[in-house]
Each structure stands twice: as C-alpha cells, then as structure tokens.
C-alpha cells in the first residue's frame, strides 16, 4: 500500500517535471488513465520506478518524445462513428453552406484520419474549395503523420465501410493511391489544411471558426481542463457556430452547458446559442 | 464486512445471467454504488443497462464520463471505452488499447477503483472464459479491499474465476446465490 502511495507521488512529480521542463501540461488530465499510461511506459523503458523514468525524461528530450507517444493515445479512424459523419452531412452542411467562406478547427487531430474524413465530406458537398481547415495537436509525431497522409491498406479497407455508412457517394479508392500495402491520400485534400502544434491546456484561440470538431480528446481531461477547452471553442466559434464532440463527450456537465444547444444530441453536435 | 463503500463486479462469458442473479438478490434499498464491467459484443453492450434496469427494478445506467458516483446506483460500462474511477469518485472513460482483447477491461475498473476506494472496496469476479480481472482483483486485495470469486464449479465458464484464484486468496469463494446473499447483508451495516 505504501508503494502505491509512492507511485502516486512520483507520478505527480513526473508530470510537474514535464511541465517545468517541456511546457507540456498534463496536470489536469484524468488521473486513472494517465497513471496506466505512465506505468505502461515504465515497463517499455525498463525503468523500475517512476522516479527513474523522471530522471531520464528530464535529462533526455528524446526520451520525453518517446514518453509523449504513450501519454497522448494516438489512435484514430476515418469516418469514426459513421452516423456522426452522416449527421454532419445531413444536418450541418446545409447550414454551413450559408457562410461565404468557412473555417473549421479539428482540435486533437492525432494522425489525421478525422481531417481527411472531413475534407472528403466537404469535397463531396462542394465546400472544400471555400473552406480553411486548421488541424491541431500536441504530438509532433502525429502531426507529421497527418501531414504525410499515408495509412495502411488494411485499415483503409475498414474505413471504406465507415465511409459508405457515413453517406459516402463515390468509390472510396478515388481518394488515395495504393502503393506497397499503403494508401497515399490524394494531396489535394489537404491543400486548404494547416497543421499546427496547439495545446488546449496551455494555448489560446488563434482564429474565428464556423465549426470546431474535437472528438475523443475531452474524455482525457478533468472537468476543469474540459471547461478550459470548451471556453476556447466558444471563443473561437462565430455566432451560431457548430461544436462537434466524441460519442461519449458532452457539454452537459460543464460550465458551458447553457452556452451550447444540442442540434443532433445523440451525435454530440451542438450549436453556439 | 464492515466499511464497504462500493462494489465492483466483473464477468465475461455467461455474465449476463450471473449478473441478473447477483443483482437480483439485492434489497430495494441497497445503498452502495455498484460498478460493473461485462464483456459483450459491442452491439449487445449498448442495451445492457436498459435490460438490467427493466428486469431488476432498480436504477441501472450506462456510465458517463465525469459523472459523480451516486449511492444505490448500478453502473455498467458501455461498449468500446474503458471505465475507470477517479480519486474524486467520479467516473472517466478512455480508449486505450483493449486488455485481453477486451474494452472495457475489468482490470482497469478494478485497479482504478482500488486506488480510489482503498479498503472500502469490494471486488467480485464471476464466470468467464478470459483472464481479465484476475490481476485487478488481486490488486484490490493488496490495497486493503475485500474480494469474492465465484466458485469455479458454480461458474458457467470456470476460466476467469480460476485465473483469479491462481493469483490470490480471496476473502470468499461462493456460488452466485451465496454472493447475492452476502451482498444483501452489506447494505444494512453500511448505513
Ligand atoms: C484519441 S486521439 C483522437 C483523434 C481524433 N480526434 C479521433 O477522434 O479519432 C486524442 C488526441 O488528442 C491529442 N491531445 C491530447 N492532449 C491535447 C491537448 N492538450 N491539446 C490538443 N490535443 C491534445 C492527443 O495528442 C491525441 O492525438
């Protein structure tokens, strides 16, 4: 039991050290998941204690980058939750169309799957040309992968089904070139995409937007940090702008519950009220 | 069993029927929170809370992210997210890789709940064809909590209880009806 208590203390110290040294702020993330990920990293790096890991992380920036891969859960899918993208297409696109130019912020874009899904949807709706997309994340490796837009063919075959269920109208293979077991995304999809390093924990708003998509990121934050992130989205969104969250996320228990109204509640699509 | 503040239950193959029997034995005024992880195919998962609530006539909800744990409430983990308990006794969801091919994972619920409740936790592991939960149950015990394993001879599938028994000596090894009876006595002492 005392060793468990030591571990909890060491984790707090590690997170503090990361913040002081690298300015990545994990202090307000949900504790249970952060603890698991640190203990998992511990085993991978052959460290006996979190303190030992802290020493290495503090003195070796390369080690911190490796640890960041464990701390950030870089998993994503194209057209994840197809019914969500179908609702975007049917309920949001007709309203989005009324703006002459559109800015969309994909916060916590990870390795880019969500951004390409959004770009494909916008192209099919004839909106991609007049849209600027900002795709942000705190993990530079994930952002690099997102910029490259190369995914395994095996996962693309799974995404194809998602695409169809999400109301996709074309042959999914039109959006990529297959090579050596990989799919290289059509680079014109990202002509209007700006990928940038941005933290919802420490950075501020950088642009006015009509739509913010932040999916499966808020669940890793505690309430306080969720409120901070929702505050950024509220500030960035224009009058009657759209906020879309992950399938298990909502504004309901937040300080912003009154300032967003549900548009398609089961799909977690909200509108600034 | 004095001082139990919360109950966590894990089950896999054969788990729905087992859960009905155990939860069905609880008195209407049972005041402890009960958190359950059951391995199910994703599509059946989504209806579990509803089905349990209808049949058990007690409040059963799918656990929401950042929800505060309330007394007398039964929570079940929804599909494809891990369920954890935070130190401030709220719930959290996450999408780390599956454990023993399972997401939600019983181990993640048990370990996080042991961190949050310490010696106030009672862990129960039921039937299943999978080793998920064995580690978590031992962890509960090591952190001062109490543990119950379903008697493998009583379990529809014995692997899960057997895996738990291979890792630690629980406080009780009981049949489903024995577990139900024991849980029913908890509540009266808790208040
Ligand atoms: C599970 S992924 C979600 C990917 C994608 N949005 C989706 O739903 O498929 C979570 C992402 O959030 C990012 N993230 C974590 N903390 C963040 C922060 N403070 N600011 C911005 N992004 C963050 C992680 O780096 C990771 O890429």
Image (spheres, rainbow, N blue to C red):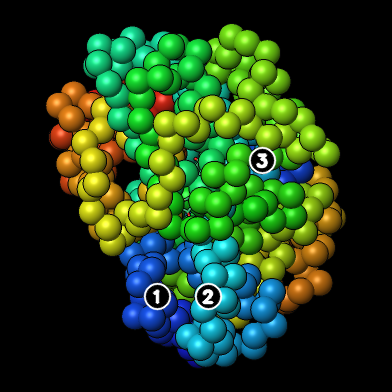
Q: Could you tell me which chain the residue with mark 3 belongs to? A: A
| Category of crowding for the residue at label 2, using alpha-carbon neighbours closer than 10 angstroms: few (below 14), some (14–19), many (at least 20) | some
Picture coordinates of residue A117, whole percent (x, y): 53, 28
> Does residue A262 lie above or below A28 as drawn?
above
Q: State if disc 2 and disc 1 touch (CB < 8 Å).
A: yes
Q: Chain of mark 1?
A: A
Q: What SS does tag 2 mark? A: helix
Dot placed on the residue nearer the N-terminal end, 1 or 2: 1
* Residue A18 visible in the current orientation: yes
On the same chain: label 1 and label 2? yes
Q: Nearer the viewer, residue A203 or B25?
A: A203
Disc 2: which residue: A64
From the image, state whether disc 2 or disc 3 is nearer to you: 3
- Nearer to the camera, A168 or B100: A168
Nearest the viewer among B47 and A256 is A256
Q: Residue at x 30, y 24 (%)?
A: A102
| Callout 2 and callout 3 share a chain | yes
- The residue singled out by tag 3 in the image is A150
CB of mark 2 within 8 Å of CB of mark 3?
A: no
* Residue B153 image position (x, y, % from top left): 84, 55
**Relative to A169, is B191 above or below?**
below
Which residue is found at the position 41% from the left and 61% from the top?
Answer: A30
Q: State the residue position of label 1.
A: A22
Percent of width and height locating residue A185: 63, 32
Label 1 residue SS? helix
């Amino acid at each position: 039991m005392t060793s468990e208590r030591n571990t909890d203390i060491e984790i707090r110290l590690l997170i503090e050290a990361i913040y002081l040294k690298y300015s990545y702020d994990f202090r307000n993330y949900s504790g249970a998941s952060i603890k698991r990920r640190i203990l998992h990293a511990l085993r991978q790096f052959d460290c006996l204690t979190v303190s030992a890991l802290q020493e290495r992380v503090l003195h070796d920036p390369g080690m911190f980058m490796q640890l960041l891969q464990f701390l950030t859960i870089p998993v994503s899918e194209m057209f994840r939750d197809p019914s969500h993208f179908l609702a975007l297409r049917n309920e949001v696109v007709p309203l989005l169309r009324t703006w002459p130019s559109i800015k969309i912020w994909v916060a916590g874009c990870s390795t880019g799957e969500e951004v390409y899904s959004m770009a494909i949807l916008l192209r099919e709706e004839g909106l991609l040309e007049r849209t600027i997309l900002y795709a942000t994340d705190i993990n530079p490796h994930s952002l690099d992968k997102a910029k490259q837009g190369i995914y395994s063919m095996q996962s693309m075959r799974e995404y194809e089904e998602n695409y169809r269920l999400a109301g996709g109208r074309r042959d999914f293979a039109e959006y990529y070139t297959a090579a050596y077991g990989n799919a290289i995304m059509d680079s014109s999809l990202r002509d209007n995409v700006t990928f940038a390093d941005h933290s919802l924990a420490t950075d501020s708003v950088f642009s006015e937007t009509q739509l913010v998509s932040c999916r499966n990121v808020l669940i890793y934050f505690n309430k306080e940090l969720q409120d901070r992130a929702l505050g950024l989205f509220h500030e960035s969104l224009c009058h009657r702008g759209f906020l879309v969250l992950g399938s298990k996320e909502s504004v309901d228990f937040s300080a912003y519950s009154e300032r967003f109204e549900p548009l398609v509640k089961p799909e977690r699509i909200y509108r600034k009220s | 069993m004095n001082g139990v503040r919360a109950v966590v239950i894990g089950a896999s193959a054969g788990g729905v029927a087992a859960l009905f029997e155990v939860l069905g034995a609880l008195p209407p005024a049972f005041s402890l929170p009960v958190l359950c992880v059951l391995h199910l195919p994703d599509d059946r998962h989504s209806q579990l809370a509803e089905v349990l609530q209808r049949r058990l006539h007690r409040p059963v909800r799918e656990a929401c992210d950042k929800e505060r744990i309330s007394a007398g409430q039964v929570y079940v983990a929804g599909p494809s997210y891990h369920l954890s308990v935070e130190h401030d006794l709220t719930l959290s969801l996450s999408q780390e890789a599956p454990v023993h091919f399972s997401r939600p994972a019983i181990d993640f619920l048990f370990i996080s709940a042991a961190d949050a409740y310490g010696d106030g936790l009672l862990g129960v592991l039921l039937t299943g064809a999978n080793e998920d939960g064995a580690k978590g149950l031992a962890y509960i015990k090591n952190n001062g909590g109490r543990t119950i394993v379903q008697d493998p001879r009583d379990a529809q599938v014995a692997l899960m209880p057997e895996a738990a028994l291979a890792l630690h000596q629980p406080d009780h090894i009981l049949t489903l009806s024995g577990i139900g009876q024991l849980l029913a006595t908890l509540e009266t002492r808790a208040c």
